[in-house]
Image (cartoon, coloured by chain):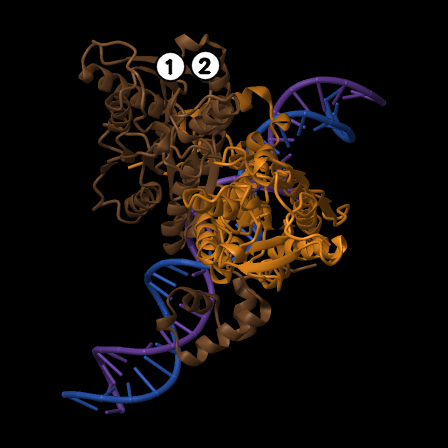
Chain colours: A brown, B orange, C purple, D blue
Amino acid sequence: MVLPVSIRDVAARAKVSVGTVSNVLNRPEVVAPATRDRVLDAIVELGFVRNDAARQLRTGTPRAIGLVVLDVGNPFFTDVARGVEDTAGDAGHAVILCNSDESVQREARHVELLAEQRVHGVLITPVDTGLAPVRRLRERGISVVLLDHPTTDPHLCAVAVDDRAGGEAAVTHLLAEGYERIVMVNGPSRIHQARQRHEGAVNAVRKAGRGAGVLEELKVPALNVVSGQRAGERLLARPRRTRPDAVFCANDLLALGLLQVLVRAGVRVPWEIAIVGYDDIDFAAAAAVPLTSVRQPRQLIGRTAAELVIEETMRPAEHEHRHVLFAPELVVRESSRRVQRVRRRDK
Amino acid sequence: MVLPVSIRDVAARAKVSVGTVSNVLNRPEVVAPATRDRVLDAIVELGFVRNDAARQLRTGTPRAIGLVVLDVGNPFFTDVARGVEDTAGDAGHAVILCNSDESVQREARHVELLAEQRVHGVLITPVDTGLAPVRRLRERGISVVLLDHPTTDPHLCAVAVDDRAGGEAAVTHLLAEGYERIVMVNGPSRIHQARQRHEGAVNAVRKAGRGAGVLEELKVPALNVVSGQRAGERLLARPRRTRPDAVFCANDLLALGLLQVLVRAGVRVPWEIAIVGYDDIDFAAAAAVPLTSVRQPRQLIGRTAAELVIEETMRPAEHEHRHVLFAPELVVRESSRRVQRVRRRDK
DNA sequence: TACGTTGGTTGAACCGATTCAATCGAAGGG
DNA sequence: CCCTTCGATTGAATCGGTTCAACCAACGTA
């Protein structure tokens, strides 16, 4: 139906050589205006579109970067993705978005695909701390920037937010508001962010001194709304007096799921149970009870990571690997504000 | 640093010809087991990864499909994207995600990029009803499936949800609950969904007969949370008696933004103002006041569209263009439930 | 008139995987 | 012992841009 039109067809039509057509495409300033116009006319008449596969094969420089995230359904990652897309687009790169869904298998499959595509670079939030897929990519000469996953490896760029500080801020806030029995609803410790945020939470309790409060960890299989609902059901199943008076969730999706279940069951938030989330996604502020959360500069993370990977691949000589660590910020809303309450015991 | 290893290096190492290596990769059954193993060993020893650009150049069959959406920040589209990614991944295709941000320029740029990549096919929610970018793609022999944008063009596949029916259901519901002065907060009429949903709303009012209620359209520049907030502020700026008693928002992001502003201003939803959204994103149920919304089968839309485009490109001969139209479903929650109220007038 | 310079253009080689006609070797049949 | 058959393997041609040394023409200078 549609016959493929190559640079040779254009050359024939414009009565020039293929070299000249290529020059018009890539260095228009070296070709005489008259010839250039003839070539451009031929291009539009034939509807020619450059075949990027051929170009890439010859030049070795691809025009796409890969982005592997844990969950496209999580607004945190879509905001990061938007940041990546912005800067990548400005640099003329396409973004191949891959969703690992927190599965090591899916992640490996996607990484393999990206390697075959010879992408410029890969931005990845690894499922596993092992970093096996990262190693595979680097062995193949593809630059990698770790997203939201700090590292000490000096051969690697990384953009992250200080999760330990974030976890500590959240729990310190809860303790300061007078909450004493805190449950942290957390994802599998395979996930780096989950571990770091928990460490921060533990730190906060320790710093507050004994007697200030206790922290319990409630593990759920994934960091999404459904898991949050499950966690809520498990808390509701406990006898009222053994329930926590505050819950710190490893991300906002968990918090929203939890909140939904609690509100539906008639539990008053924050009077009976306070909630703090993490990420400060746009929906946190619009929740049934506006959610206290730990804000991360999401788009900035994406933009910075994209800049790093582009710089690394464009000027490998001058590039210095960097570990960018942003500071999180606690945003306090109704879900955890101090309320009139009797202290259960004096210490 | 890392030297590129080609199929020739593998051939040399395994002491076979390049043809044999290619056969091991693509038709392993035709090569003798002993040779096959030698080649496989060489592949892992050298860490060879097939160069997809070269493969694509020769075979002409790419391994990526493009997905152009209006807003990656909208959970509706990320759910669709997830569906697309699922089926595409199963078929061994990468997904290149592009965000047009409702801008014709960005859309054109992305479409050009996808054309150069010679993607297998493109799933697109066009910004404009003109369908100019769609024509451009089809001229280049790239199959296109319209996403969430119905068409009568028999040369095109389309997957959509009946937006007119959805709009009608929403407003019919509001009228049935006794609301009379309805404002529809809507996006620019350039956007197809916006127009269709409004038509449905108008229909509902007309069918209900005169006197049943009035519908006013309040246009906002984009279908996102911020625009919803702006709309809320504009409504609040009106004298109380001229405010609507119900608002139908063209999507849930608008509704959530609006709800947030109203709740913060102390307006009681749904007593003073009822709200109905559209899309039934996961966050709708978790909102300050659980949101009535029109549900669309989001992942199914994505999966269906991906299947269609893959079928169209794999077996163009047998392929029949189809227009799949799913039915929306109204999900009623607190934000629009009938409340004790006096009818302002008897008719 | 000869020579150097400059701006424009040419076309063959190349990137790496795939394909397919040609070749090889071994087994089987007459 | 020769001939056919068939499975396995080979290697050159190919896809479509890019690159670069070579070339050409026109102009300026000695």
Residues at badges 1 and 2 in contact (C-beta under 8 Å)?
Answer: yes
> In screen coordinates, is A43 left or right of A139?
right
Instruction: Identify the image quadrant of residue A346.
Output: top left
Tell me which amino acid carries mark 1: Pro
Point 38% across, 38% down: residue: A122
The N terminus of chain B sits in image quarter: top left
Q: Position of residue A257 (x, y in %)?
A: 48, 26
* Camera-side residue of A253 and B289: B289
Q: Which residue is mark 2?
A: A235
Residue at image location 59% in from the left, 37% down from the top = B83
Which residue is depicted at the point 45% across and 54% down?
Answer: B236
**Does A71 appear above or below B157?**
above
Q: Is residue A324 left or right of residue B344?
A: left
Residue under pointer 1: A244
The crowd level at tag 1 (other Cα within 10 Å; few <14, some 14-19, many 20+) is many
**Nearer to us in this view, B109 or A251:** A251
Near mark 2 (Cα within 10 A), the count class, few <14, some 14-19 or many ≥20, is many
Type of amino acid under label 2: Leu
Residue B213 falls left or right of residue A213: right
The answer to which of A27 and A198 lies nearer the viewer is A198
Q: Nearer the viewer, residue A85 or A342?
A: A342
